[in-house]
Each structure stands twice: as structure tokens, then as C-alpha cells.
Image (spheres, grey):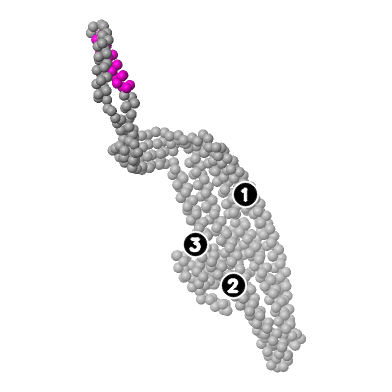
Amino acid sequence: MLLVIPDMHSSKIIISFLCIFSGLTPPAGAQSGELSLADCFRLARQKNLSIEQARRSLQARQYQLKAEQATYFPKVDLLAGYNYLGKPLEVNLQQVRDGITEGSSRQSVSTANTVYQQVTGNNLPQAVQDGIYNTTKGIINTLYPDYNPALSKQQYFMAALGLRQPIYLGGKLATARNIAHAEYQSGIINVELAEKQMDFSIAAAYIRVLYLNAILQSQAKIVTAMERNERYAASLVSNEIIPPYQRNWATVALTYARSRERNLQLDKENALVELKRLLQLPQDTVLTITDTLRYRQMAGSTPPSGFYKGNPAYKAVQSKNALAESTIKASKSLSLPNIFGIATLNLYQRDLPVITPPWMVGVEMQWTLFSGFSNQKRVKATQMFAEEVKLMTDNTQALLEAGATVVRNKVTVLERDMQSLLQAREQAQLTTIQIQERLNNQLSSVKDVNDALLVEEELGKAYYTALFGYLVAAAEYYNILGTPQQITTLLQ
């Protein structure tokens, strides 16, 4: 936890960073008792949930890429099952019974006749041939089974190893790998985009704290001056130099000034709550930020050429180009054949059907010849997606270029406003001093001093508000350039 012992009304702050935030090292600013914007950036890198979410998404895409890279390896499956056949596989011998008996009988007659011819040179008498035919046919009919033998049992268990090796898939595997790689690159950019967006949000919240510090500092001076004016008015009343109602004006003005100071203090507490939320710090953590806004001129009057290429938003859109090209190849590959090498080894061969071999190897081809023109439509859809991404890229570039120019001009306008307000503020301070001197010489009233202090207060708020807008616009400008942390050069 971050332990800080601050004194809001003292210039000396005692701060001690006891970083138990999962082993975080103390920020460099801890030694000076001030939490700098650079410290906030480092804390956010380690603790912010949005950044961590983007990192987890990147890890998932990395594993997906590794999975796609492994699809070239053969796939080996263990196949096991119990089979129960409604009717066992059989050989229908009865269907060929007549053909077998007839053919075998005539073959016996032909064999006997051939032997007789070789011995005597004559054919067997027809009666003898008929006898041999009838006798043989009777024997075969007697011995021939009167049932159909089964080729398998009605129920059996089988276990086998099946191998499937991709040989040619029409580029589907390479395309899937390219898509996974494009998604992985997009994940890297998403992490960068989350970091940059968080940097800008933290910079804006930090600048708001500095702005409220400056307003509180200015308001404290106004309250002190009004307290002094009220005391002086009280002394004049006690000496019967001015009537009591003039002191009442000073009291009323002081009361409202203190109320505004308390409201500003609550605004600062709310700003610190928002900053701690962005840093993922517990709300009971006490942060010490006592620095105030100071003007520093921003270098460069125009955006650098080609700056948009470093913006994560542009990178995120541009990364979709590779994904779009890969999806076009993927849709075209659907019309190409798939060729696999296959092999099967039966581990448990007992009671298997006789038509099931113990092992088998082969080549298998799958080719979708007609898909209802769905593949062609998918190709057109992916081509339209690629064109959309190209237009999106050009549009993002135009938006970033226009946005950078507009914000840079806004910075210039706010700089000019600050110069005018600074002069008016200095003049108001001088006027207050002059009216105070006239009051000392009884040439002005207590109310004149209060009115001068109120004008000085409003001009001070206007100046710091313009300075706050200037720094937020500068942070927005650096964010468009893709370097939001560069705002620290204007806050150091």
C-alpha cells in the first residue's frame, strides 16, 4: 500500500512509498515526495485492467498462431468402440447354390471324359456321363451347407489407431496460418493502443489535479487577502472610522471565498479518485501531488510528415489489410481439392469382421465440385471486405491528419488566450494593491477591495482554465501523434 502523510496547508510533505503492489519498485518521484506523471505511466503499465485485458488477448492469439503452425503435422487418433449389429454380416450361399452344383457336376463329367479319351481315344458313353453328373450333383447337394455362414459376430469390440496426414489442401493450412499471424500482429497493436489510450487518460486526469492545485493555491491567496481585509475593516469599525455594514461586506465576501475553496478541495479529491481508478490503486491509498500548472511552449507549429503511421489507431486499421488478403485466399481455397494420406492399425483384432483388415494405408481426396455458388459468393464478400479496409485506412489517415491540424491550431489559440489573461491577471493584481493602498489612506472602501479581489480571483481562474485547456489540448495532440507520454516535457 502507498502510505503518505500529507499536510495540505504546509509546504513540507512527508511521503513514504511502501510498494506492496505485487513487488513494484518505488517510483523515482517518491524520493522527492511527489508522484510524477512518469510514475503514473509506470504504475498503469503494471496494474491497469484494460492493458492487462489486451495482453491476455494477445497471449490467446499467440497460442492460436502456434496451433495453426502445428496443423502440418499428422493427426493420430485412438479409435475405440463397441458395435452391436442388428443382423450379422453373412455370405448368401443359397443364392449361388444351383450354379455351384451345376458347375461342379459338369466339371466332374468333363474331367472323367478327358481321362477316358486319353486312355481309349473315345468319349465316355452318354449314359456313363449322365451317371457321373447325377452322382456328383447328389454328393454336392448333400455336402453343400443349407445356411448362410456369418462373416462377423453380432457384437464385437474394436480399437485402432488412425493417422491422417495433410498432403495438399489447396493452400488452406498456409492461409489459416497467415490469418492467425495477422490476428497476432493485430493483438500486439491492440496492446499498444490500450497503452496509448490509457496514457492519454492518465495525462488528462493528472493535468486536472495540477490545475486544481493551481486554483487552490490562487484561491488560498485570495482567502488570505480577504481575511486581512476583514481584520482591517474590523479595526476601522472599532475606531469608528467606517460603519459596521462595510465590515459585513468583507465578512460575506470571505465566507463565500472559503466556501469556494472547500468546493475546489472536493473537486481535487474527486480528481484523485479518478486518477487512482485509472492506476488501479485502492481508493484508501493517499496520493501526494502538490505540483501546479506552469506554462511551457510546445515545440513544432505543424504536425510532422507521415506522423499518422505511428498512431496505434492507424496501425490497428492497417493491420486489417493483411487479414483481408488472407481471408480472400481462404475463400478461394474452398474450391480446391483436399488430399490426405491415411492409415489405420487395428489394435484389437479379435472378433473383427473378416472384411476388416488388420491395417490399411491409402490416399484420400475430397473435392467439393458444387456448393450452390456459395464459395464464389464468399470470395466476393472477402473482396468487398478488403476494399472496405482500404477505404477505412484512407479515412483514418485523413481523420488523423485533420485532427492533428485542428488540435494544433487549438493549442495556438489557447496560447494567445493565456497571454491576454496573464496580462489581465497581472493588471488585476496591481489594481488590488493600488485599491488597498487607497483604503489605507481612506480614499477607497472595504467593498472596493473585495470587488478587486473578486475580479482578481475570476481572472486567475480564467488564466488557469486556459492553461489547463492548453495542456489537455497538447496531450491530445501528442496522443494523435502516437506519443502521449511526450506531454511530460511540458509538465517537468
| Sequence-wise first label, 3 or 2 | 3
Q: Which residue is mark 3?
A: 46
> Which residues are the magenta region?
98-117
- Membership of 321 in magenta stretch: no
Q: Which residue is mark 2?
A: 268
The residue lying at 61 percent from left, 77 percent from top is 262
Circle 1: residue type:
Thr
Q: Position of residue 147 (x, y in %)?
A: 29, 30
Q: Which mark is residue 393?
A: 1
Q: Which residue appears farthest toward the bottom when viewing the image? A: 239
Q: Position of residue 242 (x, y in %)?
A: 73, 90
The crowding category of the residue bearing disc 1, from other C-alpha atoms within 10 Å (few below 14, some 14 to 19, many at least 20), is many
Q: Position of residue 158 (x, y in %)?
A: 32, 40
Assign a secondary structure to mark 1: helix
Left or right of residue 486, residue 124 in this image:
left
| Sequence-wise first label, 1 or 3 | 3
| Sequence-wise first label, 2 or 1 | 2
- Nearer to the camera, 183 or 143: 143
Left or right of residue 321, residue 250 in this image:
right
Q: Which residue appears farthest toward the top when viewing the image? A: 121
The residue lying at 72 percent from left, 69 percent from top is 420
